[in-house]
Each structure stands twice: as C-alpha cells, then as structure tokens.
Amino acid sequence: MFLAAMCFVYFAKAFQGSYMKSSITQIERRFDIPSSLIGLIDGSFEVGNLLVIAFVSYFGAKLHRPRLIGAGCLIMAMGSFITAAPHFFQGLYKYETTVSHFSASNGTESILPCLTNGSLAQDEIPTVEIQAECEKAASSSLWLYVFLGNMLRGVGETPVMPLGLSYLDDFSREENTALYMALIQTVGIMGPMFGFMLGSFCAKLYVDIGAVDLDTISINHKDSRWVGAWWLGFLLTGGVMLLAGIPFWFLPKSLPKQGETESEKKFNEGEQDCFIPDNNKHSNAPDKPAPVTMAALAKDFLPSLKKLFSNQIYLLLVCTAFVQVNGFIGMITFKPKFMEQIYGQSASKQNTLISPCNMGCSCSLKHWDPICASNGLTYASPCLAGCQSSTGDGKNMVFHNCTCVGDSPFPYANMSAVLGQCPRKSDCDYMFKVYMAVTVIGAFLSACGATPGYIILLRSINPELKSLALGIYTLIVRTLGGIPPPVYFGAFIDRTCLKWGTKQCGGRGACRIYDSGAFRNAFLGLIYGLYSLSYILWGVVYIRLSHREKKLALKNQLKAPEQDGNGVSAGNGNASSAIVKCGENADQETTI
C-alpha cells in the first residue's frame, strides 16, 4: 500500500512540476516579464525546499513519516491553487496591437495613411505618477502570487523523497529496494508526459476563454503575443495532488521488516559495511532505543551532520548530482521555449528596421504586429512593411500595396501580406522529429543511472543517518542545482532577444522573438558544459569505489586463514579472485 501511494504521489508531483515548466512561456507573456525574472519565479520552488529540508529530514525521520508526506501533499495542492489565483484578480488580457485601428467593416477596404500624422508612432514617456497608477490598474505585481504558490509547492514536496524512500528502504527486503525504487521512478516518469500534454492543450485555449468573444481576437496560438489558459492546468494538478496525499494519513508509523529472519538481518548489516567508511560506523549501539525527545534530537544533530560530511563517497555523489541537476533544470525550464523558437518560428529574416520604402510612414519600432508578406519575410508591423490599405477584420485581415515587399531583393508583383509570422521551413517538421528521437534516447540513457545512484547513496551511509543524508543531499542539490540555473539560463537567453514587447504602461515587456542561432548556442552550450563536468565527477566516484573494493578484497583475503575453510586459502595471493565475505557469516557469501 505504501509503495502504491508513493507511486501515485511521485506521478502527481511530476505532473504538477512539468505543467509548471510547460507554462513558463505563457506566464512570462501574461505578466510581461523577462526570462531572467521568470527563471527566478521557477527557482522559488527550490527556495521553499531549502527553508525546511534539513529539519524535515532529520526530525521527520523520528516522527510519523507517512503523515508528514500527506501534509506535504496538502501544501503542494494549496501552492497550485495560489499559483492560479492571479487570473481571477486580473482584468482581461490586452495584447499590444495597432491593427484594430485599421479594421474594415462589411468587407470594404480601409486606408492606412502610413501614420503620416504620427498619432500612433509617438512613444510618449509617462510621468512617474501616471506610470504608478497604470501599473496598479494593470495588476503588474500579481506575479508574486505565482512566486509564492511555487515556493509553497517546494515546501510541500520536501518530505516526499527523503522520508518516503527511507521508509521504503527500512521496511522492505534489501534485494527488493532497487525494484521498488524502479517502480516508483517508472510511474513518476509518466507525470511529465501528462503534464506537458496538459500544458500543450491549455496553451491553445485563450487565457480569457469564456469571458471574451474569440471572434474579436486577431491573433492565434502561434503568435508570440498569445497567452493560453495557463491557470486552468494549475487547478487540475492541484486537485490530483490533493487526492495523492489521502492514503498517507491512514498508513502506520512503522512496519515489520519485509520477510526478514535474524540471520538475514545480520548479513544485511554486514553487506552495508562494504560501502560505509570505518570512521562512519556506529558501535556500541543499544539494543533498545531510548525514548525520543526533541532536546535529545537537537543535541545529536551537529554530530550527525559532522559524521555525514566526513563520508567522501557521499560528498562526491552530492557534488556530482548538483552539477548534473544544474544542466537538467536549466534544460527542462526553457526547453519549451527552445523548441518554439528553433522549430516553431519562421527561418526567414524578421524586418524590424526603417528602409527607404517606409520612410514616410512615421513607424514606431516598439509596435509588434507581425505580418507575413508574399515574399516570405516576416515584418514587425504593417507600417514597417509600408502597407497602404487593408481588407477584412480580426484574424482574416489582409494588407495590400505593401511597398517594402516590392522593394525586397526579390520583388513580388503581389505586394500583399497577412496577419501573423511566416510559417517555418518545410524541413522543420522532419528535423523536429529527429530532435525528439535523440531527446528520447538521451533521456533513456540518463535515466538508467537513477536507481543505481540512489542505491549507492543509501548503502554509503549509516541506517540511522539515512533520512538526514537524503535530506541534506536534496537540500544541496535543490539549492545549488535548482535555484541558480533558471536565473542564469534566463539571463543568457535574454541576451539573444531581437525584439522586446512593450508593457501596457510603457517600458520593456517580454521578448517577442529571438535570434535562433544565438539562442541555440547559448542554451545548448550551457547544457553540454554542465553535463560534461558531471561525467568527469562520476568517473572520480567510480575510481574511489573501485579502490575501496580492492582494499576490502585484500582485507578479507588476509583474514581467510582464520575462517576454518569457509574463506579463501592462505596460499592464494590473487586479490582479484578473492571471495569477499561482507557479512562475515558462515552461511552467507557475496561475490564482488
């Protein structure tokens, strides 16, 4: 029952977390904030984890672990609901546009005077008072609710991994632990699949669905100003998390060890000695534990921490993990944006400049109303394309007599354009499939090391320090590997922006389009660099474990003459062929 509940909660938290990642772009556009700030919001999950992880892992191990996990699920659900709350406090979404001024009625043609009077081109700078009043009316600080909700999710997620895995390892057979962890990870990995599918579905629904007439919206989900119904998914993922926490309230504080006899208990304790350094082993432990008091727990906290950090294998595993998580968190946070910009945008050049063909139009460079011209180029606005007239309205608006289209290097007789950016190249679909295939293979190979890594971690520490070790491991990995990456990845990505949007109250908003080549180099370069460093560290871990194995083999070989014929003969000097008796029991042998 506990295994089934853990599988469900791992699915629910992965479902919730992946939906947050898939909604990053929608939140960025809705609140008109740069990628570096959205990275800070995304990192608030790790901040929440940081606040309580050490205390929950240490003190929680002595308390009722299943109920603490249930309480964490409740907090995570509340975090999701708070994240969605700003939508109900904000007004209707107003995207920046100028084409509404030129909409024609009854199919007639509307004249665009190229803004010769400058009425729409003037970039007025508002006063401080007007700016403050406008920002208050636009509710531009409501992104703080998203920050708070995501941080609460981090607080609630804290007990799940350290307390759940330690509970599982404490009461299951040693040989079953790896299988159970694999089951949990397998079910959990389905969460991102459903999370990103939900994110894709919600992104195609207009943010104010049900509150506006969609026929009056002149943009579609492929437009960089489009904002999907990001809030809807948080309500759904919060509800799933609420259900996932219910079983833990009815599970016991402890369980009998799964199918263990007295001799197996001694052997399992001996097997762990192969991983734990001598200076990390407890001796003279009492048969019956003394009554637990908070004062005694607090007094033993620092000595336990000191003993934990004297374990070199543990420290190497922590360092390796936080470097690798840096690359993973940065990748998963901005991967949807990467796919959108590299595989979802037109490869043609975006024209955002004043050329002689639109010189008399008094165009503003701040406006973003992209149109796709018949020459295959995307222009930032009808004005910059030099368009003189339009027909239709809303999504069906067509612009005519666009002088810049005729003046392009390959002039077209048809100087018309339609709303929206030009479609991507014909080979983009094929390249995207190749990219996804490589991504799946890479994810599979990376996931193969997850369970062995956890097993090495669990076997390298004392049983009584297990929850603390997992908690500190999570604390360091989440702090150094989870908080900084979204911020510095976002800052690097912001440097590749070609066209910034304009906020409702003036000032720079979210980026509308990026230099795809520079974006790709910055994004993939950071990921490859971090993962390469983690592979070097994994090599160091392997070498250290190999040296320890050889020392244990030699030690057991030297003890062989005293084992009454149950060990290795005294004349055999080949350490590599020795049978290592980790448990030191005559009836149990482990060959390494």
Image (spheres, rainbow, N blue to C red):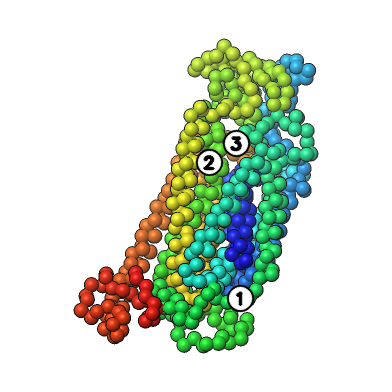
Query: Which numbered disc, 3 or 1, marks the residue closer to the eye?
Result: 1
Image coords of residue 533 (percent x, y): 40, 55
Which residue bears the numbered disc 1? Answer: 254
CB under 8 Å between discs 2 and 3: no
Q: Element under label 3? A: strand
Q: Quadrant of the C terminus?
A: bottom left
Q: On the picture, is 443 further left or further right than 590?
A: right
Say which amino acid is labelled 2: Phe
Write down the quadrant of residue 268 in the picture: bottom left
- The residue depicted at 50 percent of the width and 16 percent of the height is 410
Report the residue that reaches farthest toward the left. Answer: 571
Question: As rendered, which of 387 and 145 lies closer to the eye?
Answer: 145
Mark toward the start of the polypeptide (2 vs 1): 1
Which residue bears the numbered disc 2? Answer: 338
Q: CA distance from mark 2 to mark 3?
A: 13 Å
Q: Element under label 2? A: helix
- The residue depicted at 22 percent of the width and 76 percent of the height is 572
Image coords of residue 118 (percent x, y): 69, 24
- The residue depicted at 43 percent of the width and 60 percent of the height is 320
The vertical placement of 382 against 557, above or below, is above
Query: Which numbered disc, 2 or 1, marks the residue closer to the eye?
Result: 1
